[in-house]
Image (tube, rainbow, N blue to C red):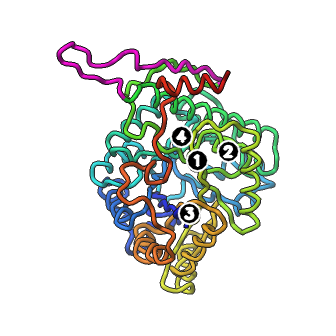
């Protein structure tokens, strides 16, 4: 084994199945309680999971994302789409509402140490200065275990929360179908996201590591020469800097991007540490990896360390495959339709799930983000049954005793672009 198989767990309410909150062992009364999420993260930490992500958005959850809905709606009118979104949002038999992911991660961090905390933050309606400082704060509170799951918002009703821009209603099928308006919006959203991440990365470097000197005798708290203006001017943002938060323990928190096609792949190649992909078959995986290689040829990588490629999978785990299929069918009946997802949905035994993860690993995938269909039930299955199988397969020899998420994931220390040695190195390359 040259590199281990890294594991992340995606936390979202009662789980990724819309009917999961109705399970007997679900905790619907606790979904807005910090203690509930702390328990989940503590459980993941007990099994040596590398990181957890926390879902978030700037609008209420809706149901029906995924290929099944996209194909079914190809012939709908724009009005139909808007009504469908409204209806999905207005369903009263699904979880609605969530806690702010960054604030929640900051609440969890003092309670559970040694596991990556990666909240979702949307770039579309959020100023990168605020995002950068919030994540630096999380990196301090967690003592070096912070990350950022980058997300865009293309929904018209979410834009209306802010009133600063208008986004026309569209359907995901319009993007996959090559609609020019949808493609232009996609390019705008991910172009803005790329600038937002670059601004954040520059702000994270805007204080050198030794900028704070605290010389009581001379009355100098900081060395002003070691704070730097970032002077970023792009199509979407103009940011002077420096950050108001000193450089945090990791220097650069880990950046995680979920991507499904060319434009998001280019964002990931340029700015992410981890890109998560959603293959459904081996052929699909090969296609995605080819598209990522194409993106690497056309986009300059700014993030430094090599990009890790992770797969995504929704898992529902029972003792036997038959039991798992029965459990999924029961939840689908409660929901009134089959579970649809951008990622592969696997209802199976622990051995089946572990075999799928190992199969991806042996095809070159660096890690997997598991989306439990039911929380906490499938997280218990992951920690008690899946991870021991992976341990026995010898693929989980991760960095024991790591002092940060970057170290845990093998990224190493993040150099500061504004430190003199780095400036000199960059100038020599430019010349």
Query: Could you say which is closer to the camera, residue 278 or residue 14?
Result: 278
Q: Relative to the observer, which residue lies in front, 65 or 404?
A: 404
Q: Which residue is mark 1?
A: 257
Do the numbered discs 3 and 4 sit on residues whose CB atoms are within 8 Å? no
Tell whether position 225 is magenta. yes
Q: Residue 94's spot in the image, x, y percent?
A: 50, 61
Residue 381 appears in the picture as rendered: yes
Residue at figure coordinates x 74%, y 46% from the top left: 262
Q: Secondary structure at mark 2?
A: helix
**Residue position marked by numbered label 4 in the rendering:** 122
Q: Going by the image, does 31 lie left or right of 284?
A: left
- Mark 2 vs mark 3, foreground winner is 3
- Where is residue 350 shown, x and y percent of the image? 51, 79
Tell me the quadrant of the picture where the N terminus can be found: bottom right
Secondary structure beneath dot 1 equals: strand
Asked if the residue under mark 2 is in contact with the one under mark 1, i.e. CB atoms within 8 Å, the reply is yes
Query: In this rendering, would 14 be left or right of 113?
Result: right
Above or below: residue 193 compared with residue 386:
above
Label 2: which residue? 264
Residue 2: give its label: 3
Label 3 CA crowd tier, 10 Å (few <14, some 14–19, many 20+): few
Which callout, 4 or 2, points at the residue further toward the start of the chain? 4
Q: Which residues are magenta?
A: 210-235
For the residues labelled 1 and 3, the Cα–Cα distance comes to: 24 Å
């Amino acid at each position: 084994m040259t590199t281990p198989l890294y594991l992340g767990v995606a936390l979202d309410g009662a789980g990724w199945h819309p009917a999961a909150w109705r399970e007997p062992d679900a905790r619907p009364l606790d979904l807005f309680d910090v203690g509930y999420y702390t328990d989940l993260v503590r459980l993941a930490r007990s099994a040596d999971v590398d990181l957890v992500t926390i879902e978030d958005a700037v609008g209420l959850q809706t149901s029906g994302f995924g290929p099944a809905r996209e194909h079914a709606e190809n012939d709908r009118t724009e009005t139909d789409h808007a009504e469908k979104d409204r209806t999905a949002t207005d369903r009263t038999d699904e979880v609605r509402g969530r806690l702010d992911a960054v604030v929640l991660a900051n609440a969890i961090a003092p309670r559970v140490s040694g596991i990556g905390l990666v909240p979702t933050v949307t770039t579309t309606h959020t100023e990168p200065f605020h995002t950068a400082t919030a994540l630096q704060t999380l990196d301090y509170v967690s003592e070096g275990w912070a990350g950022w799951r980058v997300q865009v918002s293309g929904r018209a009703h979410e834009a209306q929360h802010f009133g600063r821009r208008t986004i026309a209603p569209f359907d995901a099928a319009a993007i996959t179908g090559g609609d020019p308006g949808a493609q232009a919006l996609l390019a705008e959203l991910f172009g803005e996201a790329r600038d937002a991440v670059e601004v954040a990365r520059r702000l994270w470097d805007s204080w050198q590591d030794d900028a704070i000197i605290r010389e009581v005798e001379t009355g100098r708290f900081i060395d002003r020469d070691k704070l730097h203006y970032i002077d970023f001017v792009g199509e979407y943002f103009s940011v002077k800097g420096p950050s108001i938060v000193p450089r945090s323990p990791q220097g650069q928190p880990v950046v995680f991007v979920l991507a499904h096609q060319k434009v998001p792949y280019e964002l990931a190649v340029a700015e992410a540490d981890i890109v998560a992909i959603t293959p459904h078959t081996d052929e699909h995986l090969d296609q995605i990896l080819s598209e990522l290689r194409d993106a690497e040829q056309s986009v300059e990588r700014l993030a430094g360390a090599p990009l890790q490629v992770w797969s995504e999978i929704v898992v529902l785990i029972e003792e036997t495959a038959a039991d798992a299929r029965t459990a999924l069918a029961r939840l689908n009946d409660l929901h009134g339709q089959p579970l649809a997802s951008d990622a592969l949905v696997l209802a199976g035994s622990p051995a089946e799930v572990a075999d799928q993860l190992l199969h991806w690993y042996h095809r070159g995938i660096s890690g997997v983000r598991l989306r439990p269909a039911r929380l906490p039930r499938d997280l218990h299955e992951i920690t008690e049954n899946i991870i021991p199988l992976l341990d026995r397969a010898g693929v989980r020899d991760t960095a024991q005793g790591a002092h940060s998420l970057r170290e845990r994931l093998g990224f190493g220390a993040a150099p500061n672009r504004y430190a003199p040695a780095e400036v000199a190195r960059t100038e020599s390359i430019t010349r």
